[in-house]
Image (cartoon, grey):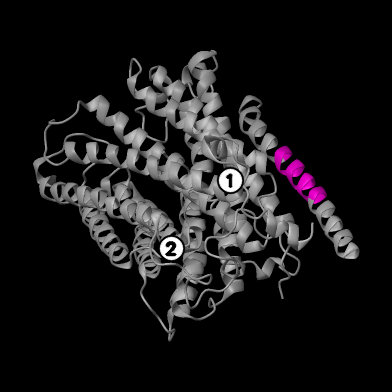
Amino acid sequence: MTATTADHHDDHHPTGIKRWLFSTNHKDIGTLYLWFSFVMFIVGGLMALVIRSELFMPGLQVVDPHFFNQMTTVHALVMLFGAAMPVFVGLANWQLPLMIGAPDMALPRLNNWSFWLLPPAATLLLISLFMPGGAPAAGWTIYPPLSVQGGMGVDFGILALHMMGISSIMGSINIIATVMNMRAPGMTLLKMPMFVWTWLITGFLLVTAIPVLAGAITMLLTDRHFGTHFFDPAGGGDPVMFQHIFWFFGHPEVYILILPAFGVVSQIIPTFARKPLFGYTSMVFATATIAFLSYIVWAHHMFTVGMPLTGELYFMYATMLIAIPTGVKIFNWVATMWRGSMTYETPMLYAIGMVFLFTIGGFSGLMLAVVPADFQYHDTYFVVAHFHYVIFGGTILGALGAVYFWLPKWTGHMYNETLGKWHFWLTVIGMNLTFFPQHFLGLAGMPRRIPDYALQFTEFNMMSTVGAFLLGFSQILFLTNVLRTIKGGEKASDRVWEGSEGLEWTLPSPPPYHTFVTPPQVK
Amino acid sequence: MQQDRANDDDVTDARRSGVRKTVLVLVVFVVAVFAWTIFGRLIR
């Protein structure tokens, strides 16, 4: 195809509902993923507000304990599988082809299917709330025997997880195939932007971890309905085996959520520090090392079920090793900012906030890795505080930063900077007010997943609830800003940011419907 | 121009073949991990 005909068809696309239902265009599917994950973020957030409302005061005021357990379980499943994972697949869909100079994803039809599996899966999960016996209520870890004893809602949950898992596997196969085969001539592996690297490694994590989860929940299903005893001691099974299998998936899952956010931050910081990323190669190897280590540390989630001392020591020290490549990354981000010509537009605020808050979550993770300390912290609010610093402070702040960073490129308009900064500060204040007091609650012994608590925990719980409502309602600013930017606003230049580097910034803002039909030459 | 087009087609063919091989390897890997997770418990 010559350049002339390619340009002629650049912006031709179907219109109406068909455009979205049958689209094989990476930009359209990226947009669908991003809106879907935002809707799930709001749904999961509303469930968090139900939880926090109940916990505002001791005693039972708002919901009954069984419904509370359903809320904690479905909130987590919706946030992890409906919001945090799809948002980065959306970002990957929009950005990877633009960043590597490819015309689209390698498997566009599979891409359409990957997305359209998600809305029915989410529907299945959410309608389980209205089943007899309610939604899954055994926690997002769906440990047996509770999950084997649950009602029909657990089956819906298992089916929903299978569908979301298939979607993730297809998405990651597509991403790996795209990055390995569709790069523009001259773009060698070590010339790829960090966001592409982190997604390539995340893709490999997904294709290894998700089939293990699929195996675990399939065995759960056969234990529930087909007379097997994989996890039932009465038939020679072992419930602890489920925990091993689950966490063999579950720990890499944490890095599936955080590595793409690392990639985003590695794009944003050099742009606003106006310096190349410090230690690019070490960043790549640190990411790969984190991914490898994530597969050999799973049992630190289950020290309290009992294991040989050598096992405890191994999992403790292996877990602590993760701090080294993670420290390399944090050092490199700080070194990139060192003596840079820094400006603090909203994406940069999110990137710095992410580095700061993720580091707090990383440190509390190190505390939890220490076996004797973990015996005290296990199943307390300290764990809840820890993983929310990692997932909200790391993953979600990274995703929000990414949206502000690339929104002008996607829409062709600049977002409102004042509104963006208000959104950042209210989100960060709300997040810290919600989760920081939970460290103290956990250290004082408040267990997680309970609707009632002793009087001594009241003040910190009240602070946490006020913070949660502030955090929740501040997202209205984000929605307003995004909608206003889509509708209009100051025209964005092609390069958008003064310090931006990379193929995506050579395209017009917004980019035409079809881009890089003729591959660019990377020098 | 014709030479450019021939080169483009070569690139496209190479990409198509690479994508096929990558997908085949990954699908076999995913199925193997899933099967091992379950059948590894059965033969324990």
Q: Residues within 10 Å of mark 2 (few under 14, many from 20)?
A: many
Q: Secondary structure at mark 1?
A: helix
Front residue (pair A217, A263): A263
Q: Secondary structure at mark 2?
A: loop
Residue position for label 2 = A413
Asked which quadrant contains residue A169, the reply is top right
Range covered by the magenta-colored residues: B16-28
Lower position in the chain sequence, tag 2 or tag 1: 1
Question: Residue A206, which numbered label?
Answer: 1
Q: Residue at x 56, y 40 (%)?
A: A19
Q: How many marks?
A: 2
What's the CA distance linking mark 2 and mark 1? 34 Å
Front residue (pair A168, A119): A119
Front residue (pair A375, B18): B18
Q: Residue at x 44, y 45 (%)?
A: A35
For residue A446, say whether it is visible: yes
Q: Looking at the picture, how far across and down is residue A22, in whole percent?
A: 60, 36
Q: Looking at the picture, how far across and down is residue A506, in whole percent?
A: 60, 70
For residue A211, say whether it is visible: no
Based on the picture, tell me whether residue B23 belongs to the magenta stretch.
yes
Q: Is residue B21 left or right of residue A302?
A: right
Q: Looking at the picture, how far across and down is residue A232, in whole percent?
A: 48, 21
Q: Nearer the viewer, mark 2 or mark 1?
A: 2
Give, as a three-letter code, the residue at label 1: Leu
Q: Chain of mark 2?
A: A
Q: Main secondary structure of the magenta part?
A: helix
Give, as a three-letter code, the residue at label 2: His
